[in-house]
Amino acid sequence: MGFAEKSCADFTSVLASKEPAPGGGGASALVGAVGIALGNMVGSLTVGKKKYADVEAEILDLKRKSDVLQAAFLALIDKDAGDFGPLARAYGLPKDTPEQQAEKDRIMEEALRNATGTPLEIMKKCAEAIDIIEVFAAKGSKLALSDAGVGVVFCKAALHGASLNVFINTKAMKDRDYAAKLNAEADALIAKYEAKADRIFTDVKAQLK
């Protein structure tokens, strides 16, 4: 059974233990899944209502995209956990001779690249989710507006959480040019989507108070 199939109690129990996976990356993916699910809830409460008939086709399309995103987030929980094993093994490789050190460096670099790719993908999915929730908040049922606000906050948290799993791995890379490229990509996502998520949240909060 994958981590995504575990109960909430089982997942959080493993998360709290000394087991190396799941960790912050998998937790971020789960939070992202919950965030987009909340956005999708707004869509579900909008569809079929006469008041929102003029946006129903758009909302239905966003719901389909949300379903795909939610499944992607859940798959990334296990992908992130699977990436950690090779990295952990690489750290334990011998380095007593120059040949062993060179081989360890090669394997480590490959493992670090793989381990960085998944949280970066989580960040990209968070960006997609924030874009979708923006429309749910603007055009969806006002009865569920607070859920859109919670959803966007969760996706922002997942964005930041995943970024730390990018940065901890790029810091260990020997290829500094490649590390800088990944860091720049992560920083750009944060710069754009932190601001967007904050705008959405502020707008939702203003409408609720």
Image (cartoon, helix red, strand yellow):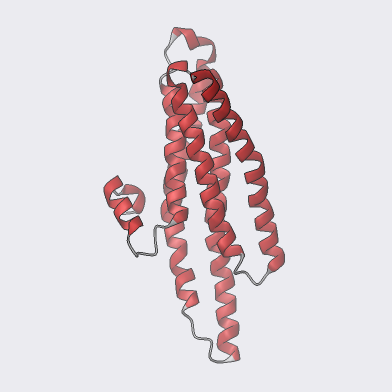
Judge whether 127 appears above or below 164 on screen.
Answer: above
Looking at the image, which residue sits at the far right?
A: 177
Left or right position of 192 against 28:
right
Picture coordinates of residue 164 (x, y %)? 55, 55
Write down the quadrant of residue 192 in the picture.
Answer: top right
Q: Which residue is at a point 41% across and 27% down the rendered structure image?
A: 41
Picture coordinates of residue 66 (x, y %)? 48, 33
Residue 7 can be seen, yes or no: no
Q: Which residue is at a point 42% across and 45% down the rendered structure image?
A: 30
Q: Which residue is at a point 47% across and 22% down the rendered structure image?
A: 145
Looking at the image, which residue sits at the far top?
A: 50
Specify the quadrant that holds the N terminus: bottom left
Picture coordinates of residue 74 (x, y %)? 42, 46
Residue 53 can be seen, yes or no: yes
Q: Which residue is at a point 61% across and 30% down the rendered structure image?
A: 199
Picture coordinates of residue 115 (x, y %)? 52, 62
Tally of numbered tags: 0
Looking at the image, which residue sits at the far bottom?
A: 97
Looking at the image, which residue sits at the far front?
A: 209
Left or right position of 72 against 169:
left
Write down the quadrant of residue 200 in the picture.
Answer: top right
